[in-house]
Image: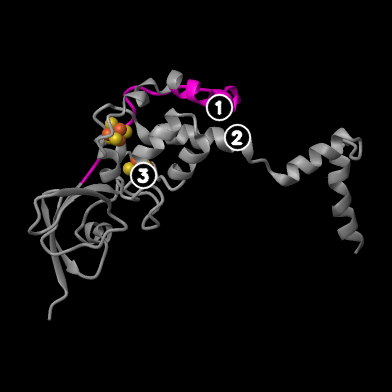
Amino acid sequence: MSNMIHLTIDGGPVASAGPMSILQAATRGGRALTANVGCFGQGVCGACRCMVRREGEREVSTVLACETPAENGMQVSFIDYFTPDRPHRYDVSEIRDSWRFADAVQEIFPEAAHCRHCGGCDRACPKGLDVQRGVALAVDGDFAGAGDIFDQCVMCNLCTLACPERIWPNHLGLMVRRVTTALTLRPVDLMRRLGEIERGEVTIDLAGPDRLQAPTTARQEG
Ligand code: SF4
Ligand code: SF4
């Protein structure tokens, strides 16, 4: 029995021996990988977003091509990268008061409060994230909860494409992750060293070059 898989990618027929992912099918079909490819199969970059209609189905779903098996009769359209039409500008270092996280969201992402709970972002997300709830938690100022939801986000932008209120959920999630990381994660070694410096336990040797030469001398003597 033949294991050839026949599908259509961006309007062109592709046939290749399976099993394989949609992305592998695209490359075997001669598609030049000038776009829609980043981590190449790791499922972490979100670049290979595409729309898929399976044989016999009317519904179109959004998936990552590197994580989705190619199937006979499948129709695939890759979605180009796009940049925000309204960039959200903020300085992470200025969002420090956790009592006022909700105010920060209202100021920087005012459209997020207009979520109509249509669930479009949830259906679009190829990672199965609870995007709608993540937006709601961020609007409420619950950055810990929202950050947990968006932690697995690969910034494919499919939720943004799906959102009728143009909320850019993944960019809101990215801001939440940036703020919580800046406020909670600190490199342990750096914290320890700063403490040592403050307590005067470490002297800063401004004559750095001399010190750098010392190991070389030692090696030569050995
Ligand atoms: S939350 Fe949005 S950008 Fe992130 S993986 Fe899901 S659909 Fe893609
Ligand atoms: S697609 Fe937009 S409006 Fe709909 S639930 Fe998601 S964030 Fe809300």
Tell me: 114 left or right of 204.
Answer: left
Tell me the amino acid under the disc marked 1.
Answer: Val
Sort mark 3 into few (<14), some (14-19) or many (20+) by Cα contacts within 10 Å: some
Separation (CA) of disc 1 from disc 2: 8 Å
Find disc 3 in the rendering and name its residue: 130
Contact check, label 1 and label 2, Cβ < 8 Å: yes
Separation (CA) of disc 3 from disc 2: 23 Å
Contact check, label 3 and label 2, Cβ < 8 Å: no
Q: Residue at x 85, y 53 (%)?
A: 216
Q: Which residues are magenta?
A: 78-105
Sort mark 1 into few (<14), some (14-19) or many (20+) by Cα contacts within 10 Å: some
Beta carbon of the mark 1 residue lies under 8 A of ligand 1 = no
Q: Nearer the viewer, mark 3 or mark 2?
A: 3
- Figure quarter occupied by ligand 2: top left
Separation (CA) of disc 1 from disc 3: 24 Å
For this rendering, which residue is in front, 210 or 9?
9
From this viewpoint, which residue is outermost toward the bottom? 1
Q: Nearer the viewer, mark 1 or mark 3?
A: 3
Residue 5 showing in the rendered view: yes
Beta carbon of the mark 2 residue lies under 8 A of ligand 1 = no
Sort mark 2 into few (<14), some (14-19) or many (20+) by Cα contacts within 10 Å: some
Find disc 1 in the rendering and name its residue: 92
Tell me the amino acid under the disc marked 2.
Answer: Ala
> Is residue 112 found inside the magenta-colored segment of the image?
no
Query: Which quarter of the figure has residue 193?
Result: top right
Relative to 12, does residue 110 appear above or below in the rendering?
above
Which labelled disc corresponds to residue 182? 2
Determine whether the residue tagged by mark 2 lies in a helix, strand or loop.
Answer: helix
Tell me the amino acid under the disc marked 3.
Answer: Asp
> Is residue 100 found inside the magenta-colored segment of the image?
yes
| Percent coordinates x, y for residue 57 in the rendering | 10, 55
| Percent coordinates x, y for residue 166 in the rendering | 29, 27
